[in-house]
Image: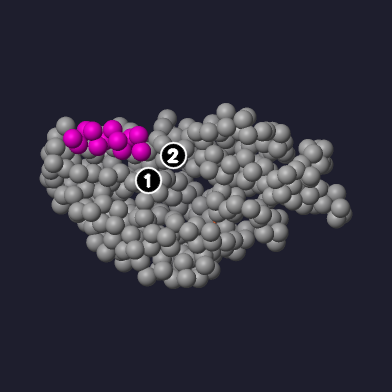
């Protein structure tokens, strides 16, 4: 069962629902599954240190729910086992950035919010389990529950946590989401992964444009382009703006330089990239009002960042590109009531014209 969802032949027998559940994963396009017992988190102290160092930036949901991270029972009382699953996202090659466009993290290329998709799939699997066992309690979690998913994935034998902090699989690299299904039954468990295959490689640490890695496996979110362009509200610190380069939403540098992601890969039907989301037209973003943004992006990953965040990012990328075609649109925003967008536009104008206003 460890690894591929299709490779179940060696798995010991479990409850009646387990076999159809695993087959269902394959049907929904999940890539990997592993099963681990519910135990106290061995990485809890690292999480505490990370927060104490301020590396969580403004992501207060870490300290606010700290105790729940100690043990997965903080998410579901009575949980005994966890099925950790991986759902692939777009892995096809990235095209060079078109002028006037911004690069988007590949997890968003489908244009669909993965929480919605994976939750829907996990709900269907829950219904399937109910057909076999009315007593089994399950809870599916995607990213938003206080679980250390990468640690659980290692415990379930899916791979190792790379120096870039992400879970790596020897065949599938790191281009996938992790989700967890907590169950109140004892299941047959996979052997934990105990080996890192990073070796002496430091490509991710060296390649990070903003030096966000404090050390192997430790990332300071305050410097991470992914955090700054997606989660962060307000102004982006000026010294980091030039390093954003073309990134308007997220950053994949520490994944794309990783040798474990080098295998040529095609997108699966379930994670097809949409051209409209691979790269975004920055002037279109700047021209949008709230209604248009809602109509176009309500169901997409951009919705989290909101129009203000996307326009702030768009202005910075236009500045980085030195795009003089954007000056008229940038000037239209300099006196905007939205000071975050207005200030980013003023900064971009200065960058393009080479002179402080
Ligand atoms: S996502 Fe980008 S900015 Fe963040 S740690 Fe990775 S390479 Fe650095
Ligand atoms: S780039 Fe190298 S060091 Fe970083 S996660 Fe990949 S293999 Fe490990």
Look at 42% across and 60% down and name the residue there: 64
Q: Position of residue 158 (x, y in %)?
A: 32, 52
Look at 19% across and 54% down and name the residue there: 78
Rate crowding at label 1 as few (under 14), some (14 to 19) or many (20 or more) other CA atoms within 10 Å.
many
Residue 114 image label: 2
Residue 47 image label: none
> Looking at the image, do the residues carrying marks 1 and 2 touch, with CB atoms under 8 Å apart?
yes
Q: Considering only vertical position in the picture, is 292 above or below 87? A: above
Residue 307 vs residue 199: left or right? right
Look at 37% across and 70% down and name the residue there: 45
Q: Considering only vertical position in the picture, is 172 above or below 68? A: above
Look at 42% across and 40% down and name the residue there: 115
Q: Quadrant of residue 9?
A: top left
N-terminal-most mark, 1 or 2? 2
User: In terms of secondary structure, where does tag 1 sit?
Assistant: loop
Q: Position of residue 213 (x, y in %)?
A: 54, 65
| Residue 77 part of the magenta-drawn span | no
Q: Position of residue 13 (x, y in %)?
A: 12, 45
| Residue 124 part of the magenta-drawn span | yes
Q: Ligand 1 near label 2 (Cβ, under 8 Å)?
A: no
* Depth check, front residue: 314 or 150: 314
Q: Provide the residue span drawn in magenta.
A: 119-130
Q: Main secondary structure of the magenta part?
A: helix
Residue 142 image label: 1
């Amino acid at each position: 069962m460890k690894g591929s969802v299709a490779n179940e032949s060696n798995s010991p027998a479990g409850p009646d629902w387990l076999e159809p559940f695993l087959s269902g994963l394959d049907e929904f396009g999940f890539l990997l599954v592993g099963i681990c017992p519910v135990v106290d988190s061995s990485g809890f102290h690292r999480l505490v240190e990370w927060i104490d160092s301020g590396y969580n930036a403004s992501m207060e949901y870490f300290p606010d729910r700290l105790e729940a991270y100690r043990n997965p029972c903080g998410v579901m009382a009575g949980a005994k086992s966890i099925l950790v699953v991986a759902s692939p996202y777009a892995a096809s090659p990235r095209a060079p950035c078109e002028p006037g466009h911004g690069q988007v993290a590949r997890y968003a290329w489908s244009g669909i919010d993965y929480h919605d998709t994976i939750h829907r799939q996990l709900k269907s699997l829950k219904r399937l389990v109910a057909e076999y066992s009315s007593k089994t309690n399950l809870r599916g979690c995607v990213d938003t529950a206080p679980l250390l998913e990468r640690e659980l994935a290692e415990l379930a034998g899916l791979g190792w946590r790379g120096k870039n902090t992400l879970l790596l699989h020897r065949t599938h690299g790191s281009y996938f989401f992790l989700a967890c299904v907590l169950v109140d039954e004892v299941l047959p468990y996979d052997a934990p992964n105990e080996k890192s295959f990073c070796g002496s490689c430091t490509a991710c640490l060296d390649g990070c444009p903003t030096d966000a890695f404090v050390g192997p496996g430790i990332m300071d979110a305050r410097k991470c382009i992914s955090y700054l362009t997606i989660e962060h509200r307000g102004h982006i610190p000026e010294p980091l703006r030039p390093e954003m380069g073309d990134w308007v939403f997220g950053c994949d540098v520490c994944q794309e330089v990783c040798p474990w992601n080098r295998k040529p890969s095609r997108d699966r039907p379930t994670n097809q990239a949409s051209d409209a989301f691979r790269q975004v037209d920055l002037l279109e973003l700047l021209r949008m009002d709230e209604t248009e943004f809602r109509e176009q992006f309500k169901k997409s990953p951009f919705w989290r960042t909101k129009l203000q965040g996307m326009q702030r990012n768009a202005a910075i990328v236009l500045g980085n590109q030195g795009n003089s075609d954007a000056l008229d649109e940038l000037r239209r925003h300099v006196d905007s009531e939205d000071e975050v967008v207005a200030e980013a536009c003023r900064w971009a104008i200065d960058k393009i014209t080479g002179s402080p206003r």
